[in-house]
């Protein structure tokens, strides 16, 4: 029997409906049982007949009851009384995580920032309140400029005004002259590599990566079931002659090798370009930090030398802030069209607001202003870390590499260096450094990768002194 509770704040029909559903679930009203006619129930409860009609209609609409005209309304036959002894607890099984996922978790944890440490993270650029203020300004302005049509589903290639800004930037800063249909916007280098792998390769293809190199790249491609061939890196960069002739994709960081920091030498570039053309392979050129160059002219891109075989990756993570998650793939128009098709049905496109903000930020000169400021800061920190390495004596124990470009340097040790113990001791002394080992697949090279972008000069000196105390 239903009951009316006058102090219940819910509307009458709602409380009666909830009770009726409970009765059906708990088997108080049995499958097939005839419900009390509306008029009679209304009288019994002292409520209007229309209230009961609302309750009965709702039960019918939700499938709890069936009606057969004059024969009245009955509880649906298939509604089983719940068997309390066998509760429904059979969630779908989640497959065992591949060990690769565990490995990648460790890698990403190493990217976490800890306030209390002098943290030489190679991933974190310089971010300050001035950058945030101009970003906020662009955000507000861009949001006011967007019209209604911008808020529908957009172009899988990405927001056209932003692609125009990137086109201009690449032409002025990197000597890359392309049409906007050769630019596809993605959400970070990982996304770019994943999309390329899904679209332009087939399961089991051989892909080569630098060893030491960018772990995220090989983890992503391995996850997509590519065969990873690690290729050593020496003072001239990738050892191109070791790239197998069956390789379908060769991933390189030619301007500033991801871990070791060397630049790909001219002979190796020529060798690589010929090899890629000969075996019809893709070169994926990850150009993640070459805008920060401390001596000499900007490094020529592989893309500008062999555009039909190259997919050039740029990312705004180091140029602005990694949190905005905006990057781009630049390549031949047909390849980009194919990537855009896959992007359309897998991810659709990047969120409009971040794209519009970055477009405004670039168009109104804030981006170049930030770059000039960041370059000055990085130049000072870069000089300071070299001096501090020399002054602390670390230069006698390690070989310093990769100092021409970018936001990190390598302190390379010999193979007997006990990286784990030394890194832990450094950590205990309040200094966080990244082990070269974590960038290696087969390579046994040892040392520390030191990012200096967000450590101020005073702390750089202190950090190097503490490292020297740890290892010397
Ligand atoms: C080698 C390399 N490539 C690309 C990137 C940019 O990655 P994302 O665009 O996913 O932030 C980084 C960032 O640290 C990097 O180290």
Image: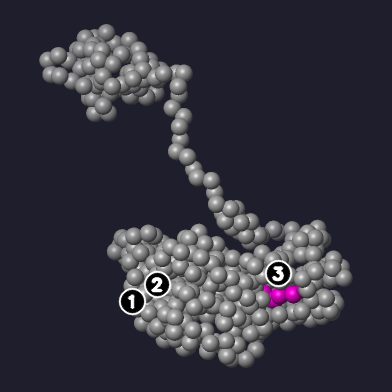
Which mark's residue is nearer the viewer, 3 or 1? Answer: 3
Which mark's residue is nearer the viewer, 2 or 1? Answer: 1
The x and y percentages for residue 400 are: 74, 79
Residue range highlighted in magenta: 406-413
The x and y percentages for residue 121 are: 67, 66
**Count of picture labels:** 3
* Viewer-closest of 74 and 216: 216
- Report which residue position mark 1 lands on: 334
Structural distance between the alpha carbons of marks 3 and 1:
40 Å
- Disc number placed over residue 39 in the picture, else none: none
Structural distance between the alpha carbons of marks 2 and 1:
12 Å
The x and y percentages for residue 174 are: 50, 85
Within 8 Å of ligand 1, the CB of disc 1? Answer: no
Q: Secondary structure at mark 3?
A: loop
Q: Is residue 416 left or right of residue 22?
A: right
- Report which residue position mark 2 lands on: 184
| Crowding at mark 2 (Cα within 10 Å: few <14, some 14-19, many 20+) | many
- Disc number placed over residue 444 in the picture, else none: 3
The x and y percentages for residue 322 are: 55, 66
């Amino acid at each position: 029997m239903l009951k009316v509770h006058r102090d219940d704040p819910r509307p009458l029909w709602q409380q009666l409906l909830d009770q009726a559903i409970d009765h059906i679930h708990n088997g108080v009203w049995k499958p097939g049982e005839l419900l009390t006619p509306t008029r009679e129930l209304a009288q019994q409860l002292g409520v209007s007949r229309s209230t009961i009609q609302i309750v009965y209609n709702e039960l019918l609409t939700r499938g709890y009851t069936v009606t057969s005209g004059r024969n009245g309304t009955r509880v649906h036959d298939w509604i089983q009384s719940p068997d309390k002894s066998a509760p429904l607890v059979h969630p779908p099984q989640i497959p065992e995580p591949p060990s690769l996922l565990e490995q990648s978790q460790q890698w990403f944890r190493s990217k976490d920032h800890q306030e209390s440490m002098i943290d030489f993270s190679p991933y974190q650029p310089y971010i300050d309140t001035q950058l945030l203020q101009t970003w906020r300004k662009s955000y507000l302005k861009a949001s006011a400029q967007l019209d209604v049509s911008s808020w529908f589903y957009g172009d899988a290639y990405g927001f056209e005004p932003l692609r125009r800004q990137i086109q201009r930037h690449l032409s002025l800063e990197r000597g890359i002259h392309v049409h906007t249909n050769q630019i596809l916007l993605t959400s970070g280098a990982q996304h770019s590599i994943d999309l390329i792998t899904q679209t332009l390769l087939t399961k089991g293809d051989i892909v080569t990566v630098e060893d030491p190199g960018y772990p995220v790249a090989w983890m992503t491609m391995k996850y997509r079931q590519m065969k990873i061939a690690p290729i050593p890196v020496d003072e001239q960069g990738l050892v191109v002659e070791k790239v197998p002739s069956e390789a379908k994709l060769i991933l390189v960081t030619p301007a500033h090798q991801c871990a070791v920091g060397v630049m790909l030498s001219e002979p190796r570039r020529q060798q690589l370009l010929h090899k890629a053309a000969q075996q019809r392979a893709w070169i994926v050129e990850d150009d993640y930090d070459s805008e920060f160059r401390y001596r000499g002219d900007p490094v020529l891109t592989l893309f500008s030398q062999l555009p039909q075989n190259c997919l050039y990756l740029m990312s705004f993570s180091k140029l602005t802030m990694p949190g905005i998650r905006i990057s781009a793939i630049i390549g031949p128009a047909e390849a980009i069209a194919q990537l855009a098709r896959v992007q359309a049905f897998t991810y659709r496109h990047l969120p409009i607001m971040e794209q519009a903000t970055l477009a405004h930020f670039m168009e109104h000169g804030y981006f170049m202003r930030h770059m000039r400021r960041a370059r000055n800061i990085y130049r000072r920190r870069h000089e300071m870390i070299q001096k501090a390495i020399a002054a602390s004596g670390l230069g006698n124990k390690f070989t310093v590499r990769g100092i021409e470009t970018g936001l990190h340097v390598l302190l390379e040790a010999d193979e007997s260096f006990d990286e784990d113990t030394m890194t832990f001791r450094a950590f205990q002394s309040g200094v966080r450094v990244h082990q070269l080992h974590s960038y290696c697949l087969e390579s046994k090279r040892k040392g520390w990768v030191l990012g200096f972008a967000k450590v101020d000069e005073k702390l750089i000196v202190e950090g190097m002194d503490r490292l020297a105390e740890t290892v010397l």
